Amino acid sequence: MVQILKVHGSENQFFILDQTKLKQQLSDEELKQLAIKICSPKTGLLHGSDGLLVVNDSKYNDCIGQMRVINADGSEAKMCGNGLRTVSRYLSEKFDKVEFKVETLENNLTVKKSQDLAEGLPTFSVEISPISFAKKDLPFNYKDKSQLIDDEVPEFISGQTFTAIAVPNPHLISFVKEVNKADLGKLGKLGKLLNDPNEYFPEGVNVSFAKILDNNKLFVQTYERGVGFTNACGTGMSATSLAFAIIHGDKFDYTKNIEVFNPGGMVQTNIQLNAVPEKSQIRLIGNATFTHKIEISENDLHVAKLSKVDIKITGEEDNYQNFVKSLNK
Ligand SMILES: N[C@@H](CCC[C@H](N)C(=O)O)C(=O)O
C-alpha cells in the first residue's frame, strides 16, 4: 500500500503523491488520468480537489525534491504557490530540514518553514519566481501590446483595467471596487472565455479580481486555468500583490508584508520591488495543512481505481478553521 495525502493551502485543495515511494512511477498519461479522476467532485476522493501535486526526486544536487502540478482537468501547470507550501512541508518532514530548495518546472525555488500564522498551523514561506510581463512568456496577443500593465481591454470587460504577469504560470489581474455576485459573474465569464480556445491567451490564463481593503490589505478571488473558481490561488495572490505594489504604490508599505484575504482564508506576501519590475522578489507565506492520509494500492494508482482506499482524518482542519474565525477582515 502507498500513502497519499489530502492537503490544502488557504483551502486550495490538493492530493500529494510521492512517486519516490512507488516501485514504478506513473507515466504522464497515468498521472493525467489519476488527476482527472481523483480531483473530480463526482468521481474523486473526499469531494475532489483542485489539483494533484506530484513529488519526484530532483535532478539537481541543491534541491531535495521536485514538484509537478497537474490541474484538475489533467493539464500541467508550471507552478502552484499554495501547493508548493504543502509540498515544502511534506519534504521538510521527510528530510527533517527547515530551509531548502525545490525543483519546479521552470525554476528551483527556495522554501522555508516560517513562524506559524496561528496555533497548530504549520506555515511555510516560498519563493515565487521568475517574474515576467513579456507577451511571449504569458503568452498573450492584444493589438500591438508587448505587455499589459493597468491597461484597458474593453474586449474583456469595459471600464476595468488589466495587468498580465507570468510567475511563471500566467495571470491576468484586475483591481475592482467590489467583488460581489455580479462581479463574480463577470469573472466567471471572462475566465471561461480566456480558457476556452481564444485569440488573446492561447494557453489560457488564471484570472483574478482584487479589491484593495486597506494599505497592504487585499482580497483576491481567482478563476483558475484548468480548474475554475478556487478558494485561493497562491501564484495569483503573489502576482496580484506585485501588481498592487506597482500600480497602487501609495497604498503599499514595502517594510511590511501584505495580507491577502481570499474565500478560503488569508496568506501573506512579501514584495521587494525593484526598479526593473521583473527583478522584484516575491515570497508567499501561509498555511500548509494536511487534512487526510489515504492508503491505496500502487496498482490501483496506475489505473486510477479509487474504490478500495483507507482514509484517516488528521484533525488539523480544526486548527485551520479556528485560524479563519480569528481573522480580522
Ligand atoms: N492554485 C495554484 C495554481 C495552479 C496552477 C494554475 N491553475 C495554472 O494552470 O497555472 C496556486 O496556488 O498557485
Image (cartoon, grey):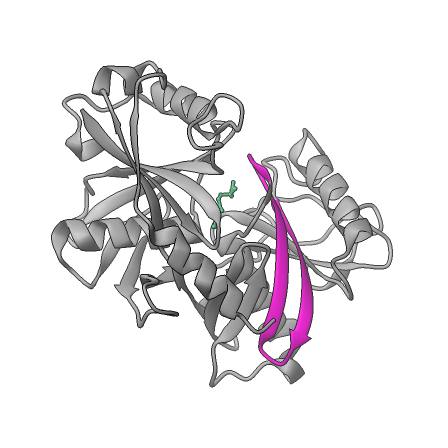
Q: Which residue: 57% across, 74% down?
A: 328
150, above or below 302, in the image: below
How many numbered dots are placed on residues in this image?
0
Question: Foreground residue, 227 or 134?
Answer: 227
Q: Which residue: 29% across, 20% down?
A: 301
Find residue 32 and report its image quarter: top left
Q: Which residue: 46% across, 58% down?
A: 321
Confirm whether residue 36 shows in the render.
Answer: yes
**Predominant SS of the magenta segment:** strand
Q: Quadrant of the C terminus?
A: bottom right
Q: Is residue 219 magenta?
A: yes
Image x and y of residue 64, in percent? 18, 50
**Residue range (magenta):** 206-228
Image x and y of residue 308, in percent? 31, 18
Image x and y of residue 278, in percent? 49, 65
Q: Is residue 157 magenta?
A: no
Looking at the image, residue 146 sits to the left or right of residue 79; the answer is: right
